[in-house]
Image (cartoon, helix red, strand yellow):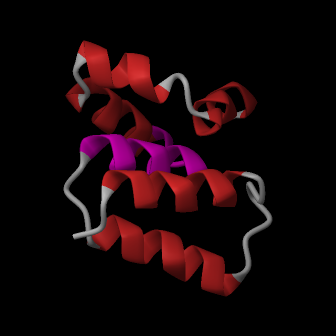
Amino acid sequence: MVSTLKAFVKLNRNQTLFRNFKDEEIEEIIELQRNTEDNMILFAISILLARKKEIEYYKKKLSIEELKNIKEYPIYKLLDKQ
């Protein structure tokens, strides 16, 4: 299992490359997805990969506190671009 902080560091780094991913970056993101059950991380991955149905699914699974926390991350701002 990957730690939440470590996962968000990777995801926030990758959000700067939004939609211009190289194959190895996509592999890294999918590997993160396979190795976590954390809904915040899965929500962030869905945002990063622009998977709208998954975004909706994982957003519903977040607590009010988790949603408040994730809104502080730059990756959340990508929702406005989708």
The residue sitting at 57% across, 33% down in the picture is 73
Residue 49 in sight in this render: no
Q: Position of residue 76 (x, y in %)?
A: 58, 31
Q: Quadrant of residue 25?
A: bottom right
Q: Is residue 42 magenta?
A: yes
Q: Is residue 28 above or below residue 47?
A: below
Q: Quadrant of the C terminus?
A: top right
Number of labels in the image equals: 0
Q: Quadrant of the N terminus?
A: bottom left
Q: Position of residue 17 (x, y in %)?
A: 77, 60
Viewer-nearest residue: 26 or 8? 8
Q: Is residue 19 magenta?
A: no
Residue 40 in sight in this render: yes
Span of residues in magenta: 39-52
The residue sitting at 39% across, 69% down in the picture is 32
Q: Is residue 20 above or below residue 56?
A: below
Viewer-nearest residue: 54 or 66? 66
Of all residues shown, which one is farthest toward the bottom? 24
Q: Is residue 36 above or below residue 58?
A: below
